[in-house]
Image (tube, rainbow, N blue to C red):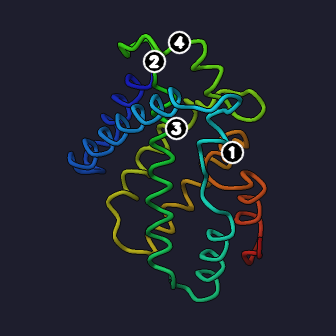
Amino acid sequence: MFAELLEKVIKVIEGLASEDTVLELGEMKLEEQNDILITFLNRKEGTTLFPDYWKPLPANRVIKIWNDYAKLGFVRDEKGIGQLSNKLIRLTVRLAAVSDLDPSDFDDDDIDESDFWDWAVDETGQYVISDYAWSNLWPLIMSLYEETDSEEKLQYMDRIFNVVHQRSDLSKFFIEGGRRTLDKLAYSTEYVDG
C-alpha cells in the first residue's frame, strides 16, 4: 500500500529532492521498521506503541521557538530547531514505516501478526497508521531534510504541522497535545505560552 503510494509521490517530486535524500529517507524507514519490530518483540505486557514507545515533539519547546520567532523575526535557538526538525523527520518516517509494515514479511516465528496489530495502537485502540496526506508530507519532509537554514526549517515544520493539523488523530503523533497545541500555534495572531 504505502510502497506504491511512495513510488507515485517520488514521480511527482522528481527534482524537488536529491536522489541521496530519497535513498537516505528510505533507509531510515527500513531502520524504523526494524526498530518497531524489535520494540514489539521486547515490549512489556500491557503497553501499546503510542504513547508507550512513541514520543512526539515537546509542545513547550515548539511553542517557545515559535514565540521567539514571532517576536524576533529569526530563530534564536538554532540547535533546538535542528533537534526538533530531525525528530519531526524521524516521526514522519516512523509513521510511514508502521503504515507500510507487514509483519508477515519477516521470517520470525515470534511475530504474531494479530498480536502486532493489537499492540500497534494508540491509547484509544486506534491503529498508529495513516495513508492520509503522504503526497503533501513527503515533499515537505524531503525539503526539511535537506534544509540548513533555521528559519526555513521552521517554515517547513510549520507547513508539516498544517498538514497534520487537519487530522486530530494524526497530529498527536507529531506534537504533545496534538490538535490543541497546533490550534494555539495556528489560530493566534501571537503565539501563546503553553
Q: Residue 108's quadrant in the figure?
A: top left
Type of the residue with mark 2: Asp
Q: Distance between the residues labelled 4 and 3?
A: 20 Å
Question: Which residue does the numbered mark 4 point to in the structure image?
Answer: 112
Which of disc 3 and disc 4 is earlier in sequence?
3
What residue sits right under mark 2 in the picture? 102
Which residue occupies 57% across, 62% down? 158
* Three-letter code, disc 4: Asp
Q: Which of marks 3 and 2 is nearer the N terminus?
A: 3
Say few, some or many: other residues with alpha carbon within 10 Å of mark 2 (under 14 / 14 to 19 / 20 or more): few
The residue closer to the viewer here, 139 or 194, is 194
Residue at the spot 64% in from the left edge and 55% down from the top edge: 175
Q: What element carries label 2?
A: loop
**Tag 4: Cα neighbours inside 10 Å, few (<14), some, or many (≥20)?**
few
Distance from label 2 to label 4 (Cα)? Answer: 11 Å
Q: What residue type is labelled 3?
A: Leu
Residue position marked by numbered label 1 in the rendering: 166
Q: How far apart are marks 3 and 1 (CA)?
A: 16 Å
Which disc, if any, is residue 95?
A: 3
